[in-house]
Amino acid sequence: LDLQAPGMPAPIRLDFFGDTLESIRSFDPETQRTVGQLRSLDLVPMSEVTLTTDTIRRFRQGYTALFGAQTRGDMLYEAVSEGRRHPGMEHWLPLFYGETDTLFDYIGDAPLLFDALAEDAAVERLAQIQDYYDARKSQFDVDPAGAAYKPLPPEALYLSPDQWRESLGARATLRATPFAQPDLRGALDCGARPGRNFAPERADDNVNVFEAAVAHVRALQGAGKRVVVAAWSDGSRERLASVLAEHGLKQVETVASLSQALALPKNVVALGVIGLEAGFETPDIAVVGEQDILGDRLVRQRRKTRRAQDFLSEAASLSAGDLVVHVDHGIGRFVGLKTIEAAGAPHDCLELHYADAAKLYLPVENLELLSRYGSEDADVALDRLGGVGWQTRRAKMKKRILEMAQQLIKIAAARMLHEAPRLVPPEGVYEEFCARFAYDETEDQRNAIDAVLDDLGKGRPMDRLVCGDVGFGKTEVALRAAFVVAINGKQVAVVVPTTLLSRQHFKNFTERFSGLPIKIAQLSRMVGAADQRAAREGLASGDVDIVVGTHAVLGKQVSFRDLALVIVDEEQHFGVAHKEKLKNLRAEVHVLTLSATPIPRTMQLAMTGVRELSIIATPPVDRLAVRSFVTPFDELVVREALLRERYRGGQAFYVVPRIDDLDEVQAFLRKHVPEARFVVAHGQMTPTELEDKMSAFYEGKYDILVSTTIVESGLDIPTANTLVVHRADMFGLSQLYQLRGRVGRSKTRAYALFTVPANRAITPQAQKRLEVLQSLDSLGAGFQLASHDLDLRGAGNLLGDEQSGHIKEVGYELYQQMLSDAVAALKAGVVEPREEQWSPTIT
């Protein structure tokens, strides 16, 4: 094991024989030769703050001088005085040292290169720091003893504007600009200028953007320029070549590099994979970027697909104290990892405790024998090792599971026996429709699209759940399925839970289908009576091909001439009556369900194989995980979060659990964030009022949207990247996750602040929900969260009868595995549905 500690002159090599450290040597990193031997080596955690006698004394003196004599209860002061580290103590770094250095103290006389507008951004940042300090200082001045935060002056932590200008001084600096301008001092004009962008053509429904691009290429060739078309990836290059050829550009040749492109005759267009965000022109060459033609287009790294059902894939996913189920021994408690000596060799084992203080050591290579118990009930009885109770419970459960599996198979079989139209995408037009998608499809997304198209072409009703994290591209799967159905002359119904989401989907569908002979209508509370009547008449006559709407689409007054596909977005928000209507449709038409956090019952049906499941787990390119914080309500923290978003040109959501809470939040914003403009929205407003306010927020006329959970489902506002949730303990786990998904939908880092009452305890269930949410801060955690929800809430009543008590006998995960196995076995015809063929032993 090689390591390079910052304070050591040479790297260190640790040589092991098994687990025994044989030697510690320093070595030359260039020659790899040993330069010295060490008898011992101390490795200690390092920080910007080192707690020594001198630094502690200096901190105590400086802290007292700035903030007065300390009273009991100042946790920072007490921790440092005792030599303990305190979270966030780096905020008071200058108090520990005589002086602190800046970047300029390290780089000597090296020249500096400033990106465009970097200096303006630095000035704005310094002004923002001063504003934060003023807010904290004013609170400290009012109540020094009770202030939650004691701030240092900005000049102690940061350069002042004068110091910033002085540090730049006579230092050599270079300033970058997007393109050189003749009026800039010292700028080099190489004759380049930005290329043509086809945004006007994309916005005009009567103009084909590909025809415009071909005409522009021919005009460039007529001017004597060599033309290069830059694509983002091999796949998009092939698609561009095909589409451009269809629109008359025949002399196109693919190239592997720019040098190959320059070697071609000028009448041949070179098409290569070149990572440019925008094209440009010089006197001799014109580069047309893929984004110039199609709009923002981003590539994403390919990731390996992950199995949907890897609940317990590694020992690291277990925590000490977790309840687990051993397939042969029943419910036990995981204590930790332990190395034991067996047959003369060490083995890493999981230590499991059972009833009567019995212990079981399970080798890590046999981890597949374990599953989570799921429930966190403190009164769960552990099984006895070697007892018959576990085997008896499991045998009874198998009998019930087999009966349940038979009924589930009957439901699936009834659907399989029905016929549905075989729908296949037409060549050429389908590729052109796909080319309008502003991203490269991820592997998961492509697999989901292929699976849906395959289902549509089989001739029997599709019932597929696409589970993908918020903003991971589920809508594109729906768009392509809708295109295939509509272009074949059939009708599509897109059903969503809220009027706002209906409005957004209608806008997305209208933009993507512009220029195509497909008519789209909307049915929701926001649509006027005359338009609703026209939409219903169009659906009945067949004039309307795609309808986007809320549960109004499922109403008795709505009839379809030839409905072939129902797309259900965010199914977890629909009530029982609406789901029954959808259930009846499933046997007759294709049904595609989209959800980031499906309800446990939907998850269970999908994971047992009764409903088909596709998972999209790959995030978009440059997507950053949302930073999540659960904190007691602090007026200044909320103010800082909202103003930080405003200063970087973004917008924020402020979500409350009840309409009654809106007045309190409005009063808070007027008093503490007067700089920000906010607008209030909730579900009891009239359609016109809600439409006007949401449109104004979309257009950036307001900084903050204060609302109830109407923003929870699917809203896509890329400029909104800060979320504050008021009384987060009053929301459900799926709700909190969906709310967090409203931010962070662009390349900008997003922040979510979940506030709880400052001086009141919250319920254990709410505490658990918030802990789970904070732990799942990685991208693509929606499926994992739905699995947690399955653990916390149970699988529900799959067939209308109560099963949760029986499920708890063996644990949710093992129950689900057993049910999946039973369904698969019945599907494959491996077992007859007779209970005597089911032995109580799992093999």
Image (tube, grey):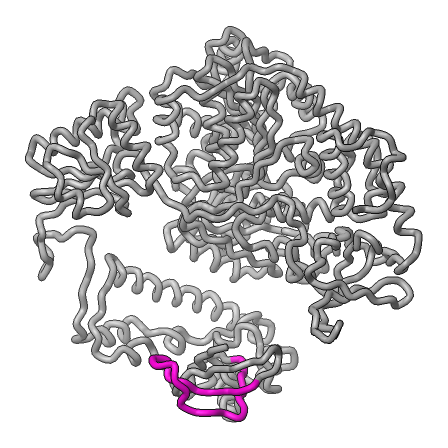
Q: Is residue 77 above or below residue 764?
A: below
Quarter location, residue 832: top right
Q: Is residue 703 visible?
A: no
Horizontal side of residue 702 vs 59, given as left or right: left
Quarter location, residue 777: bottom right
List the single residue furthest toward the front: 343
Horizontal side of residue 720 vs 416, given as left or right: left
Q: Is residue 515 visible?
A: yes
Q: How many marks?
A: 0
Q: Position of residue 788 (x, y in %)?
A: 68, 49
Horizontal side of residue 189 vs 615, given as left or right: left
Q: Position of residue 723 (x, y in %)?
A: 52, 50
Horizontal side of residue 674 vs 612, given as left or right: left
Which portion, as a residue range, is magenta?
Answer: 22-45
Q: Position of residue 482 (x, y in %)?
A: 48, 23
Kindly identify the residue that appears in the image at 49 percent across and 32 percent down. Answer: 449
Kindly identify the residue that appears in the image at 61 percent across and 12 percent down. Answer: 557
Q: Position of residue 500 (x, y in %)?
A: 52, 32
Kindly identify the residue that appears in the image at 77 percent across and 47 percent down. Answer: 814
Q: Nearer the viewer, residue 358 or 43?
A: 358
Q: Is residue 749 above or below residue 705?
A: below
Q: Is residue 89 above or below residue 755?
A: below
Q: Is residue 195 magenta?
A: no
Kindly identify the residue that appears in the image at 52 percent across and 8 percent down. Answer: 537
Q: Is residue 38 magenta?
A: yes
List the single residue furthest toward the right: 388
